[in-house]
Image (cartoon, grey):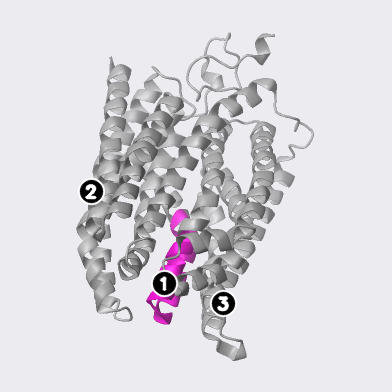
Amino acid sequence: MTSATPPKGPASSSLEKSTSRPEQPVDLPPDPAPARTPGAILRQAGFLSLSGLFATSALLLDANMVAPLGDEILAGLGLSAGIYGIFMALLFGLGSAAQILLSQSASSTAAAGFYRRLCYCLVVGIPLALILTLLFRFNIHFLVDWLATTSGIGFAAKRYLGWMVYGLPISFLAYLLSLSFDVRHQSQRQLWGFAIEVPLNIALNAILIYGLLGFEALGIMGAAIATLIAQSARLFYLLILTAMDLSKAGPWVGLSLPSMQERLLFNRLALPVSLNVGALILGSQAYQLLFAQLPYQAYAALALMAPWRSIANVLGRGIALSSTMACADLSLGSKSMQGAIASIMIVLKNMAPKLALGFLGISMLVCALSLHVSGTVRLHFLTLIPLACLLVFVRSLSVSFGAVLRAIDQPQWVMRIQLVLQWGAGLPLLLVLIVLFDLPLLLAFGVLVGEETLRLALLYRRFRSLRNAQLA
């Protein structure tokens, strides 16, 4: 049957209209142009970045509040973040596929179609999150014992991960619900959830880490418990918002199982995009775990810088997500697509250098104010700043080019290029160098920067050729 065949063209083609019917103005979202201007892309990126910044605030708060407990505790937190990120990788990969799928139906006047896709993503994702939670829970000690370089680092990591393992389904569900507001350009609504999470996390961190108000001082374990409670509070807020929207839209009568066409497109998107994004995140965590094999004071410097690098990555990813939303529902060759690509280029040219310079200033300030860490850690931190600044610039561009190409061009090509460079070149090279040599921190970090730079060159070449084809 023709209805069971996937639509021709890019993965971003709309599923709400028949491929045999000519495009008509009534099928397009009303007045789409304003959402594709540089200013609109940048405004949406601002909301997405703010959401991402608040989402990463847990690691930032934990790193700064456990730092006075000692270098090994700080390094243990860094190791915990790396291991935790391994299990979040596939979930965020699935979320990236869901973001493209939801963006395509966000402008539709039929609310049932949007919520049908959202429910389908949840049905697929939640069991996966629970399975990963079980796998994580029963392998914490094995992973930490294998990767920790000192007993103090291992002890701290086990105490933190023993609680944070239960944050996997909480984080994933909150991520998908947040996306459902972002793609409808309602980011400001879900942002209020962080007005609950962040203050609660700060207060509980102070109480549980240091034992204020008569509570027992739990150290790094208290930081994990505080984070779980605060994230659960925000998830509860997002569930209330979603339930309110469902009651207002009244989609239940028209809500049904996804059509064969929708399932085929989801499967077509989910596999390459999930594997691509998941493997990239997994590779990023693998880099961190390899860095953990360096002398612990060098790795402590990386752990101290990690939250600020994460913030820079979040800002760059906000631009990438906004750019994807601007073009995910457009057809290749259309005038709207030409305008969207031109706007994306303007935003990237303006923002990538600013992100790198902002990171430089913040890093210098952090180094000056980090009087609670040892002089050796501060020296390592200072020497990392130039390379880390370059990495921020390169990654902010490559993430955006890769995200847009996955949505409008060939996700399989993007997946192959990125995985070959990361898993076939960068990680094996770093592993060999660490095993065979007493590698200095700068050289180890330079491998990561070199791999990211080569990736950017290939993605930009593909993006530029696509843009030229659009203008031809």
Please report the residue visible at 59 percent of the width from the left and 24 percent of the height from the top.
Answer: 265
**What's the mark number on residue 204?**
3
User: Identity of the amino acid at label 3?
Assistant: Leu
Where residue 86 appears, as percent x and y from the top left, is 50, 51
Residue 174 position in % (x across, y down): 60, 53
Q: Residues within 10 Å of mark 2 (few under 14, many from 20)?
A: some
**Distance from the alpha carbon under mark 2 to that under mark 3:** 37 Å
Under mark 1, the amino acid is: Leu
Mark 2 vs mark 3, foreground winner is 3
- Distance in Å between CA atoms under marks 1 and 2: 30 Å
Q: Residue furthest bottom?
A: 214
Residue matched to label 1: 74
User: The C terminus is located in which quarter?
Assistant: top left
Q: Which quadrant of the figure has residue 44?
A: top left
Considering the numbered disc 1 on the image, is that residue within a helix, a strand or a loop? helix
Q: Circle 2 sits on which residue?
A: 353
Numbered circles on residues, count: 3
Task: Tell me the amino acid under the disc marked 2.
Answer: Pro
State the image quarter where residue 153 is shown: bottom left
The residue positioned 62% from the left and 23% from the top of the image is 264
Image position of 434 with respect to 22: above or below: below
Q: Is residue 253 above or below residue 39?
A: above
Q: Would you say 179 lies left or right of 464 here?
A: right
| Residue 184 visible within the image | no
* Residue 53 is a magenta residue: yes
Nearer-N-terminus badge (3/1): 1
The residue closer to the viewer here, 44 or 458, is 458
Q: Which residue is outermost to the right?
A: 253
- Residue stretch rendered in magenta on the structure: 52-81
Of circles 1 and 2, the one toward us is 1
